Amino acid sequence: MKEMKEMKASVKIQYACAVMLIVSSIVLAFYQVMDIDDIANGTLMYIAQAFLLAGSIFGLNYYVNKLSILYGKKDIDSPSRNPQQ
């Protein structure tokens, strides 16, 4: 819980968008199966793109966090990254 309080607002928004994409895909697939007993091609494309985007959001944030730990910086986007400016 402590990590959630320390996260930036932009990271929280990214995670919320990724979770909403996954939830909306599952709900849309469930609705199509229950309503018409079939999933249309457009729905499958939406589900695939939503999962791809959500996965890339989680993966990119993980990669940036790993780089910041590797280089010993708390925040990789901080202005102190390039002190000569």
Image (cartoon, grey):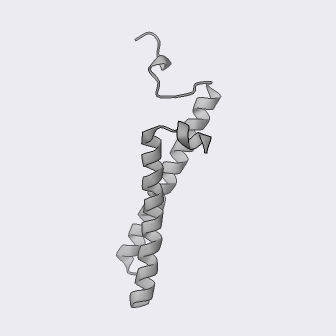
Which residue is at a point 44% across and 9% down the rendered structure image?
84
Q: Position of residue 56 (x, y in %)?
A: 49, 51
Which residue is at a point 43% across and 40% down the rendered structure image?
9
Q: Quick one: 13 or 41, which is closer to the camera?
A: 13
Q: Position of residue 51 (x, y in %)?
A: 48, 62
Q: Quadrant of the C terminus?
A: top left
Which residue is at a point 46% across and 45% down the rendered structure image?
12
Q: Is residue 45 left or right of residue 19?
A: left
Q: Position of residue 44 (x, y in %)?
A: 42, 73
Q: Quick one: 2 or 49, which is closer to the camera?
A: 2
Q: Quick one: 60 or 22, which is closer to the camera?
A: 22
Disc tally is: 0
Q: Is residue 42 left or right of residue 8?
A: left
- Above or below for 68 versus 48: above
- Above or below for 77 versus 41: above
Extreme top residue here?
Answer: 84
Extreme left residue here?
Answer: 42
- Above or below for 22 versus 85: below
Which residue is at a point 44% across and 74% down the rendered structure image?
27
Q: Quadrant of the N terminus?
A: top right
Q: Position of residue 82 (x, y in %)?
A: 47, 16
